[in-house]
Image: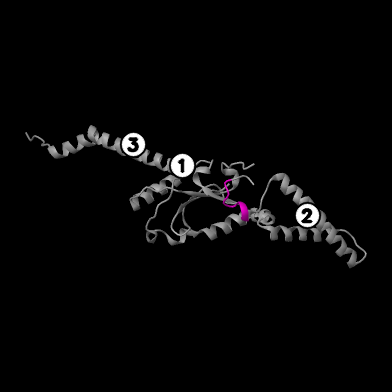
Amino acid sequence: MKINTVDLHEQLIKIQKKHPSESILEEVEGILQNEEQHEKRIIESIENGSNGLSIDESLLDQEQIFSIDQIEKLCIKYRLRFLDSKHFKGEIPYAAIQKIKKLETEFGVQLNGFKIIAPKELFRLTDKDSDPILMLPLKNNRFYFIHKWGGEISALRALLAFPMRNFMSMFWFLAALAVVFSWAVPTPSFDVFIFLVVHSFIGICGLACMLVFTMRENFSTEEWNSKYFS
């Protein structure tokens, strides 16, 4: 009678797969705890807005590095704010935290000093009387794109924000409005048309000033990086 043999090594492997050792389970639990602590520290860094640090920019994706002038132009065009992440009152998505973890692992440093581009409604602003972008500050007033969340910003926002970009944009907007208004009114001659344009422009300017002061708004060139209400 032939008796089947048993490979002890194979049996040991089967037991290992079926009953993992407590040390392995503890190791896995330790890794998960470390990851949780890592993510918690990143969230605290974003919420506290600590000072940034220098990293080797040559290892970064150069297409994702933006100057302060470029950011300013974006904020002015779409009437956004560019502030320290500690002022942000929205929720930071998990995908953004994962990207920061990946960068920290690659560079072997703890990143902080984050900035966020977003509409002012998403910030906790200080009273002096829809699509956020998380940025990491680098050297020479440049910033590295980390993550963007939310939906796409409406192209109409740039058009609606045009009058409040700066003083001249407001001037030309009100002038165009006066011309359109005068064009819609029948006039017997060109001289009367010009007279109507001038006086309607003055009237529209008065209404605009009253509206802007009532709403406590300011031009985007003045408030794009302000932590205060307009």
Query: Nearer the observer, disc 3 or disc 2?
Result: 2
The numbered mark at residue 205 is 2
**Residue type at the position of mark 1:** Asn
Q: Which residue does the numbered mark 3 point to in the structure image?
A: 33
The answer to whether 106 appears left or right of 88 in the picture is left
The percent coordinates of residue 207 (x first, y second) are 79, 50
Q: Which residue does the numbered mark 1 point to in the structure image?
A: 48
25, 102: nearer the viewer: 102
Residue at the far left in the pictured view: 1
230, 47: nearer the viewer: 230
Q: Which residues are magenta?
A: 221-227
SS at circle 1: helix
Quarter of image, res 163: bottom right
The image shows residue 38, relative to residue 187, as above or below, that is: above
The answer to whether 188 appears left or right of 199 in the picture is right
The percent coordinates of residue 80 (x first, y second) are 59, 51
Query: Nearer the observer, disc 3 or disc 1?
Result: 1
**Residue type at the position of mark 2:** Cys
Dots 2 and 1: beta carbons under 8 Å? no
**Residue type at the position of mark 3:** Gln
- Rendered-image quadrant of the N terminus: top left
149, 86: nearer the viewer: 86
SS at circle 3: helix
Residue at the far front in the pictured view: 129
